[in-house]
Amino acid sequence: MVGIINFGAYIPKYRLGADTIGWHSNQERSVANFDEDTVTMAVAAGYECIKGFDRGQIDGLIFASTTPPYSEKQCAAIVAEALDLNENLFTSDVTDVLKCGTTALRSAFDAISAGSCGLMLVIISDSRQGPPRSETERNSGDGAVGFLLGSHNVIAEYEGFYSVTKNLLDNWRSNGDPFVRTWEDRFAIEEGLENVLNDATSAYLLKYNMKPSDFARVALYAPDGRRHTSLAKGMGFDDNQIEPPLFGFLGNIGAAFAPMLLAKALESRVEGERLLVASYGDGSDILGFKMTQDTKLSRDLLGVTGYLESKEILESYETYAKWRSVWDVDDGSRRPDPQSPSAIALWRESDKNIKLYGSKCNSCGYIQYPMQSICVNCQSRDDYLSVRFSDQQGNIFTYSMDYIAGSVDVPLVITVVNFDDGGRILCMMTDREIGKVHIGMRVQMSFRKLRVVNGIHNYYWKSIPIRGVANAGN
């Protein structure tokens, strides 16, 4: 039996909403922070997805996005290293089309069924931008979702698929375009979305001799809430079968939209129920699933629901514009351009910077970061074990705030974090509210982007307040 073993999600902390000055809309949408992109969000979703599993058993990873940070370099390799997966791993990027998320899922299921991979991780992450204050911008959102797939202990059995391809210029973005372009609305909806999804869904039902009433939930792609409901009903589904599209809370997260609704549906499904996933983009992928056991989200996982509720509303649209470079915002600083990262240094220090490895002395048990050949406590030499700090929590031992460092998010907060299991790190802090930072504050680590110089995306780990409903805004 091939299917979904586990799932995880990540939704950025910040939202544009009714209280955001200059947003002029009551509709909320998720917004990636200035140091987040599709790779960092993929790492966060991946960590939630594989928590509690032996990551050494994962032998495949597919990263899907229409907005990868690199046009030529595999992002799946970065995600795999940040998640500390094995090097003998099949990795692939799937991109350039809105249905790349479901395409990645189908490809992974095919690989597992064929026996070429046993346990695969598929992560779909997107951060599409529309023109300032356009309908596309209002309806869009940022986020990532991950699925651990295999043939044992599945919670949702993969029952089948149907795919169609249709060359249609309704949404596109050429090289150098910062924003998604769209054609006339009526043409895009009637000739594209409605025809393609109706035909693909009908063909799936015919292929497997099924009908709409056989499904408890349908996770359906749509550009906005109104069309989502009308489209689902036009396909024969009732209100109680439609997985809420989260417009007004999250937004359309592109390639991750339908897979995110699948993850949301999986949070509280009952054994025997069927789920249907329908994506869109130059055609459609239809995937069917059957629940093999009741699902109840672990207390250690936030899931889609927890991330939706753990949020902070941005004070002004200008902040978002500065983060996403929607338009140039002059902050008055005059500083020299930063130096380009060294490709050799990035490679040589990947264990320290990407995997976030420290060391534990075998002689005295002292834990330290970064990894040291000589123990600072007992001075024993080259006698240590590697320790991964990326999935640990800790407390702020001390911190400082720099208002003249030239950070995008002033002030730059530097923290010294004491990890619960031992060890200490000096690092930047992000996703923080200045008035709530304090000594003893509980924090966790988050994979983030430091800067982009000469086209090189320089990633590292930062501390963030522990996400959770009770900690929302902290």
Image (cartoon, rainbow, N blue to C red):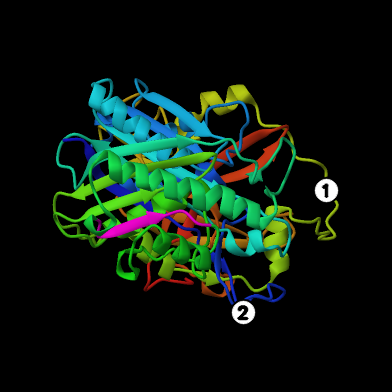
Check disc 1 and report the residue beneath it: 335
Which one is in front, 277 or 318?
A: 277
User: Which residues make up the magenta segment?
Assistant: 215-222
Residue 374 in which image quadrant: top left
Are there few (<14), some (14-19), or many (20+) residues within 10 Å of tag 2?
some
Check disc 2 and report the residue beneath it: 19
Q: Is residue 234 left or right of residue 462?
A: left
**Nearer mark to the viewer, of 2 and 1:** 2
Percent position (x, y) of residue 201? 37, 47
**Which residue is depicted at the point 23% across and 48% down?**
210
Identify whether 233 is placed above or below 98: below
Q: Is residue 312 left or right of residue 310?
A: right
Q: Amino acid at mark 1?
A: Arg
Q: Amino acid at mark 2?
A: Asp
**Which residue is depicted at the point 40% across and 64% down?**
233
Whether the magenta-drawn stretch holds residue 37 is answered as no
Percent position (x, y) of residue 353? 50, 36
Q: Earlier in the sequence, mark 2 or mark 1?
A: 2
**Which residue is depicted at the point 69% across and 65% down?**
319
Give the alpha-carbon distance from disc 2 to disc 1, as whole Å: 33 Å
